[in-house]
Image (cartoon, rainbow, N blue to C red):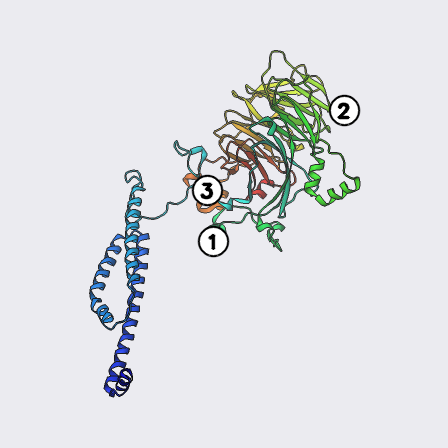
Amino acid sequence: MKKSTKRVDRAEEDLPTTRRRLRDREEMEEEEVKAERIAREEKERQLQRRVAAENNEDEEWEDASDEEEEYEDDDDDCMDEIIEEEIIDDGADDDEDDEDYAEFQRETDELSKGMRRVTFDDAAMPQDEDNEGDEAAPTIWRSDQAEVGTQDMQLEYSNKAYDSFFQLRTEYPCLSFDVLQDKDAGNRTKYPLSLTLVCGSQADELSKNQLYVLRITNICRTKHDADSDSDSDGSYIGDEGDSEDDNDQEEEEVNNGEPIMVHRTISHYGTANRVRCAHHNTNLVAVWSDAGHVQVFDLENDVSMLCDHAAWAKKQARQGIPKKQSAMLFCTPSTSHKTEGYGLDWSTVTQGVFASGDCNGDLFVWKPSDDGRWKPVASSTSSDHAPSVEEIQWSPTQADVLIATRVGGVVEVWDTRDMRKSKISWQADPTDINVASWNRARQASHLLVTGADSGAVAVWDLRKIGESTPIQQLPWHKGSITSVEFSLHNESVLSVTGDDGQCTLWDLSLERDPSEEKEVIGELFGRQDLTGIPDQLMFQHQGLVHPKEAHWHAQIPGMVITTDYAGLHLFRPMNWRSLMK
């Protein structure tokens, strides 16, 4: 009855009391809105303080702290009113916000201390306050002007320097390789491109070594970096897009524009010192092993499987499942070479003939026999251990003439019909002649280029050997020269690889014309970091780790492949058309 009576009494309350309760409810709602607005403003202030912490703006942090204290003092009454009206407001969020703020403050202090620790010496790198934070303009790396202490500098290349560039790694370093000519057409320029290589490994154990037969397809034009794309077309020097492939639009991009590689492996005992493919049949590959013998392999089955797997599978099905046969066709007998060697080359005139030279100075010429093997048909051996044969190059026009370079800087011309003594020899360099290349273009078959341990690259006219002086020298590399090779598409163009980590491309026919040069390169003309560059230097590929070989691709104009301790580089410079003209 008490409750009923009380309820009746409350129902009979007069109108002013009812209005007062409604007004109190409206004030409570306003206070709730005000509290939400305050909380939202506090979160905004915390966000601002975070940004200030990341930018190391300590003064803004202090200002924000003062504002927070003032805000807390001014709003105490408001919060008291909310409590008096029995509005439940959880204070946990405010406590968390205070803890977050304290944590941000600590992180900011640590960040500031860390930034003060990781700064450059003011005396070594003075900076004006107005220029503080400005990034230094990138400079061009000049290996010929490298100062002491710059060995650990990291180089960054511009994608705009390349028409195509691709890097790959193998399980073990491959210090020698060669290009296998495939059945695709020659003079290929239209992307995507494909090629086939054979490489010999340098494993940590002799028994782990292999020959890698690599088939690389879907080689596309290099995509420029985002910052490079925003540059104007005139910000770099390259060939004009005058070929039909420049306007080609790929209907569908395969593998996101990245190359696709498949491979086959062939067991090979010992490190492959030198790998060379026959000129008339590139499926025949001769390999110099550090075990002291030369082996010849037939890679036709492996290449067919990689290049045209469907046709290879049909052929295998028609023939049944044949007994697995070794790819090795021949191994030099122990009665020939007594130690390992590096000199190795196939004749460009006589099919199937190759020559090999070892570290004892012995030289052998091998000719194929009727039983599918090879036999020595000429040799030059010495009991007193002549200087090591480092390189062999057959004449591109004469079937019985070859050149051998030796330790000590001597170059010899041999007639294989009488190998009792070299016909001509001359001192090409005081140091070892590591490599040589005989120009295979008929109109330039009198030119020979050599590379020495001293870093000297010399071009010789074989018609003027009696003068014993090169017709041209290329002073650029600072390390020993490890590879030289004339291009098959332009008789005046050659590649040079040195132990200084770079592969350079040269055009011997060029002469500097300052007026034309200024017209072409514009504002770059006369820049200090571009002075002193040889007139004939057309391209410089860097970033290699002890490179050993570089070869031009016979079917893809302008394509160069290099090998070093880190893997293989396949690149086509932006000015490849100028090189191939």
Residue at mark 3: 156
Q: Position of residue 264 (x, y in %)?
A: 65, 37
Find numbered disc 2 in the image and state the secondary structure of the residue it sits on: loop
Residue placed most toward the observer, 110 or 342: 110
Q: Earlier in the sequence, mark 2 or mark 3?
A: 3
Element carrying mark 3: loop
Picture quarter containing residue 151?
Answer: top left
Image vertical order of residue 287 relative to residue 30, above or below = above
Q: Secondary structure at mark 1?
A: loop
- Quarter in which the N terminus is drawn: bottom left
* Contact check, label 3 and label 1, Cβ < 8 Å: no
Q: Which residue is mark 2?
A: 369
Name the residue furthest top: 384
Give the CA separation, mark 3 to mark 1: 18 Å
Q: Residue furthest front?
A: 1
Mark toward the start of the polypeptide (1 vs 2): 1
Of badges 3 and 1, the one in the foreground is: 3
Q: Amino acid at mark 2?
A: Ser
Residues packed near mark 2 inside 10 Å, few (<14), some (14 to 19) or many (20 plus): few
